[in-house]
Amino acid sequence: MGPGLWLAYAIGTVGVGVEWRAYLHPDGRAFRRWSAAAALLWSVMYLLLGAWTAALGMATTALRTLVSGWLRRPMHKHLAATGFVLAFMVLTAITWQGVVSLLPAFAVINTTLALFYLDNRRMRIALLASSAAWIANDLYWHAWPALIAEVVVVGLNVRTIWRLRGEGV
C-alpha cells in the first residue's frame, strides 16, 4: 500500500468521526455544518483514490449542504436546488468513469432534493437511499473508511429518525 493510499485512509478515518457526529445531531443546522466538514474530508480522500466523480461531487456537496440551511424563501431554495442538481449533472459528465459514476451522482442529487425540500425527519429518511448508493460506490473504490462510516451512518440515521418520531418532529 503506497503513501497516497495511507494518506487517503487517514483522511477518511478523520472523516468517519466528523460524519458520525453530524448524524448524531438532532438539530438540522448543526447536522448541515458537521456534514459539510465531513464532505470536504471525503472529497480529499476520494481524490487520492482516483474517484473523480465522488471527489468533485463531495467538494460541491459541502457548499450545497451549508447553503441548504441558509435559504428560507421557496424561490431561493428552488433556484439553488436546481443549480446544484445541474452542477452535479455537469460534474458527473466531466468526470465520467463509467456506470460507477452514477452512484455518487444519484447520492448527491437525491441528498440535494432532500435537503432543500424535506423537513428534518423526512430529509433523513431520504438520505438512507443516498447512503445505499455511497456504500456501493465505496465498495467499488475500496474506500474502506467511507464504507465503514456510511454503514454506521445508516444506523445512526435510523436511530435519530426514530428519536425525532418520538419527539413529534
Image (cartoon, helix red, strand yellow):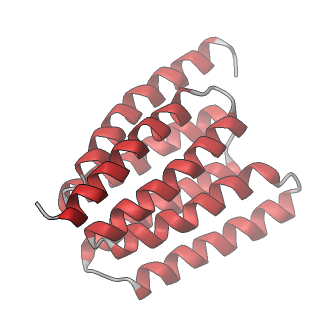
* Residue plotted at (46% across, 72% down): 56
Q: Quadrant of residue 98?
A: bottom left
Q: Residue furthest left?
A: 1
Look at the picture and state if 158 lies above or below 128. Answer: above
- 57 or 158, nearer to the observer: 57
* Residue plotted at (34% across, 43% down): 13
Look at the picture and state if 156 lies above or below 56. Answer: above
Look at the picture and state if 162 lies above or below 19. Answer: above
Q: Residue furthest front?
A: 3
Q: Residue furthest top?
A: 166
Expressed as whole percent of the image width and height from the top left, the position of residue 114 reads: 60, 50
From the viewer's perspective, tell me whether residue 118 is left or right of residue 150: right
Expressed as whole percent of the image width and height from the top left, the position of residue 72 reads: 86, 51
- 86 or 51, nearer to the observer: 51
From the viewer's perspective, tell me whether residue 65 is left or right of residue 101: right
Expressed as whole percent of the image width and height from the top left, the position of residue 61 reads: 56, 61
Q: Residue furthest right?
A: 73
Image quadrant in which the C terminus is located? top right
* Residue plotted at (47% across, 30% down): 157
Image quadrant in which the N terminus is located? bottom left
- 7 or 161, nearer to the observer: 7
Expressed as whole percent of the image width and height from the top left, the position of residue 124 reads: 55, 37
* Residue plotted at (46% across, 55% down): 41
The count of marks equals 0
